[in-house]
Image: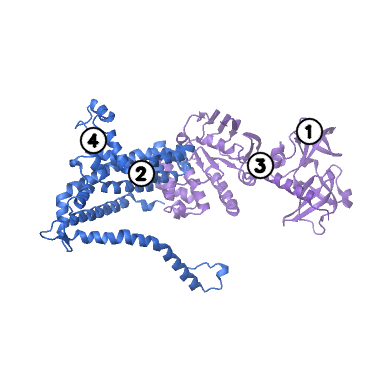
Chain colours: A blue, B purple
Amino acid sequence: MVAVVPTSAAAQPASVMAQRRGRTGYLLLFPGMAWLAVFFAIPFVTLFLTSLQKPIPGKPGKYTSGLQFSNYADALVEYWPQFLRSFVYAGIATLLALVIAYPLAYFIAFRAGRWRGLMLVLVIAPSFASFLLRTYAWKTILADEGVITSTLNSLHLLPDGRILNTGIAVVAGLTYNFLPFMILPLYAALERVDPRLIEAAGDLYASPQTAFRKVTWPLSMPGVVAGTLLTFIPAAGDYINAELLGSTKDRMIGNVIQTNFIEFRDYPTASALSIVLMAAILVLVFTYIRRAGTEDLV
Amino acid sequence: MADGSRPVEDLHLRNLSKKFGDVAAVDDLTLTIPAGSFFALLGASGCGKTTTLRMVAGLEDPTGGTISIGDKDITGLRAFERPVNTVFQSYALFPHLDIFENVAFGLRRRKVKDVSAQVEQMLALVELGPMARRKPAQLSGGQQQRVAVARALINRPDVLLLDEPLGALDLKLRRQMQIELKRIQVEVGTTFVHVTHDQEEAMTMADTVAVMNSGRIEQLGHPADIYELPRTVFVANFLGQSNLIQGAPAGHSGDDVLVSAFGETFAVPAARSFAVGTDVIVGVRPEKMTILDLVDEHRVPEAHNRVHGRVTDVSYTGVSTQYLVMTPWDQELIVFEQNVVVGDRCEVGDEVVVHWSTQHTFGLDGSAGTSVGVDPEVLALEAAAQALIADAPES
């Protein structure tokens, strides 16, 4: 690459300039890399090593380093239902969030006019209260004597007669809690869609529905992909919602990891589960991005 | 395309109006655009020309009036139901589709068969065949512009609307595309309605030009007719340049109307005078005037109008020389002289006489002054220059 050297620096040899530029680059990278090393790479390696530890006989809760790969098999055999449930719950919550967020983001991007800023603030506003607090609030909202449950019950729409402590409550909580992570990327993508393109589609015989299907939706795809990932990934690993809103039958993998770490002190199993969860999410995400074909979009 | 299967028909706008709040963007516009013509709506920004175009396209609902093609009223139809296509100012090409799919978009929506043959043919017409699989972002401005034309034209609309289609191109490319667009229009025979603020573009390309101002049409006709005989001060100033002298009617002389201004009398053929009241403006185009040194005044033909003055500026532009001549009443006239004479040209400070044939003179209603239609920025610049001269210390 030919460097364009400013005239004031013309006296300096180009190689010195290039070297200096390279050094600046590394300096700028340093804080991020250091952060990643301390808070991701090292913990990850520790976690991986922990997942291979074996128990010290006669000393419950004490482990020694080893290469016990059977930890993984044991964990999966015991906890695969919770794994599956996590992905199902997270998947449903993501779909619900998309269905709720898309029209909202569309409205904010195209129709809100001067209310746009206010509406965006309102989307983020709940995050000012703690995640835990908001989830507790859902306990009240979905309580057995609450308005929602009694209304739905009077219509005989609830098979169990209640919402709280069921999978429905967990999914509702997940959807609610991660909704802003869906709305914001969708808004960012839709806001970039030139309304003149929608006009052009109309001019070229596309009905409003067709114009949406052929122009707006494909152009908002980057936002859809980003939003679903930002919702699905944390939702799949979440344990607060299942803990507070679900019963023991609705436990997700996050709860299993948490109890294994904190209560059972079975660190190898908990670590193995964490790593499997991470790997599973990575595989899902990669397949998804491939299928969505977003690298083709600007 | 005029393929014979469907006769091309005239576009009629009747009493068309569009109000944005209290502001009338288009004000009771009635207009017939003949089938197969290249029609230009010319005006400054905000004159209502784009609003008119958008109403024809169905992208804007008229406040009143009707739009029809032939006998068919299309006022109530939505954009996607109209046999009209648009070339947008910013092209509005679909960034996620390649050139082929952009051009095929309209055909696919109408479930037309044989899409690829038609698209290939259209891409050949605009000379973009090899670009079919590129994305719009990979094309130059001129190429994108041709894609926009192809994408609209392939649908064989009754009317093709062009909204400042060349505005984003640089000057040289713009001239090239003007010729190109004209060629395509002649080839396909579709009615083109072209909105522009560039008077040269309108005159080069269009068969008929309508000059718009404040939501109304000031004058409509063949470009040469409008240029040679502007009917309003706005047109005289907006379309090319004009020397306009404010005066008052002073009787008749044969077929001529006489106008007196600042002690001079000018003759205007009665057929070329559109003045009605007590304020008359005498006008002439700068290239119609001849400049002579005062000592040669005897060479001015008797029947010509003439003005005395002093040369204040000479700009040699190659093809012609542009003179500024200050009249005794402190008005600067602009004179273009073709560089066909070998030898002396006038110089700054020369006392001269400027003359022109009465046949090139026109008379306008002068109640609104001489500066209507002059670019406000030009007026501001002139005022600033005046102020500078006034403030300059005597040397």
**Which numbered dot is residue B162?**
none
Instruction: Out of A251 and B106, give the one closest to the viewer.
Output: A251
Instruction: Out of B142 and A260, give the one closest to the viewer.
Output: A260
Please state the chain letter of the residue tagged with numbered disc 4 in the rendered image: A
Residue B113, located in which quarter of the rendered image? top left
Which x, y percent locates residue B338? 75, 53
In the rendered image of this protein, does residue A32 appear above or below residue B42? below
Q: Give SS at disc 3.
A: helix
N-term mark: 3 or 1: 3
Q: Which residue is mark 3?
A: B223
Mark nearest the camera among 2 and 1 is 2
Mark nearest the camera among 3 and 1 is 1
Q: Which residue is mark 4?
A: A164
- At 58% from the left and 49% from the top, the residue drawn is B178
Please state the chain letter of the residue tagged with numbered disc 1 in the rendered image: B
**Which numbered dot is residue A182?**
2
| Discs 4 and 1 share one subunit | no
